[in-house]
């Protein structure tokens, strides 16, 4: 048969179309400016000798426990408020683990922090019962009025806001945990008072 063009392969069609397309460069994102810092990204000074000595003491005390890594991480955070990145090598050496294994556990469990928290830590419950009773409204108030979003710390270091999923206080939702103290039926006015009290605290955690 004459007058028919040979069929082009899919690859040829794609190449032809790509050659006729002009690609615009990806836009450079504009940094978001807000009066808070994300706790996982916060820039902080290197761990002090005192903090590293505390890490070494915890490792020495708990290294012989079965599955010692999690108890050690919990103990370090209970004492220092966070798990310093500089502690990873010391923990790995003490437990005969790789650095990647220790780092993987720290980053897998969201409860572990790698930067110092604010002077007050507010954990707002995000489970179903608390969502039904208005926890999202509380989160919105913290973000819009007090300048702190979930996972962030206020710029003055007063308050860190973290999510938690069920505090076992569903009958009194919405619930929150403030420095380990369980609160129920938290209102916006209650939140305002908590933030004010946090900002009145002096010194460091």
Image (spheres, rainbow, N blue to C red):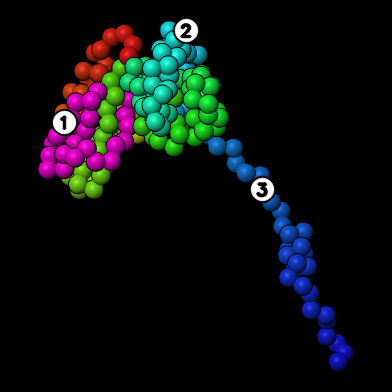
147 w.r.t. 56: above or below: below
Which residue in the protein does label 2 denote? 49
Marks 2 and 1, how far apart at CA: 36 Å
Whether residue 20 is visible to the viewer of this picture, yes or no, is no
Looking at the rendered structure, the secondary structure element under dot 3 is loop
Among the 4 quarters of the image, the one containing residue 130: top left
Q: Nearer the viewer, mark 2 or mark 1?
A: 2
Say which residue appears at 73% left-offset and 70% top-offset: 10
Callout count = 3
Question: Range of the magenta residues?
Answer: 159-185
Q: Nearer the viewer, residue 189 or 78?
A: 78
Q: Nearer the viewer, mark 3 or mark 2?
A: 2
Which residue in the protein does label 3 denote? 24
Q: Quadrant of the C terminus?
A: top left
Q: Nearer the viewer, residue 156 or 79?
A: 79
Q: Nearer the viewer, mark 3 or mark 1?
A: 1
Say which residue appears at 38% left-offset and 21% top-offset: 62
Q: Quadrant of the N terminus?
A: bottom right
Whether residue 60 is visible to the viewer of this picture, yes or no, is yes
């Amino acid at each position: 048969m004459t007058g028919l063009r040979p069929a082009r392969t899919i690859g040829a069609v794609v190449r032809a179309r790509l050659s006729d397309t002009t690609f615009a460069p990806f836009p450079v994102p504009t940094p978001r400016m807000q009066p808070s810092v994300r706790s996982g990204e916060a820039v902080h000074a290197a761990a002090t000798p005192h903090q590293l000595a505390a890490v070494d003491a915890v490792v020495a005390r708990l290294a012989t426990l079965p599955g010692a890594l999690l108890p050690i991480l919990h103990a370090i955070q209970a004492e220092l408020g966070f798990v310093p990145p500089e502690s990873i090598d010391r923990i790995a050496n003490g437990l005969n683990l790789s650095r990647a294994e220790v780092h993987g556990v720290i980053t897998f469990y969201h409860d572990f922090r790698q930067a110092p928290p604010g002077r007050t830590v507010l954990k707002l419950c995000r489970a179903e019962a608390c969502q039904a009773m208005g926890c999202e409204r509380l989160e919105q108030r913290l973000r819009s009025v007090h300048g702190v979003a979930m996972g962030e710390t206020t710029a003055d270091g007063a308050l860190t806001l973290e999510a938690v999923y069920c505090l076992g206080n569903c009958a009194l939702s919405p619930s929150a945990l403030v420095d380990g103290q369980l609160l129920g039926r938290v209102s916006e006015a209650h939140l305002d008072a908590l933030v004010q009290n946090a900002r009145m605290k002096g010194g460091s955690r």
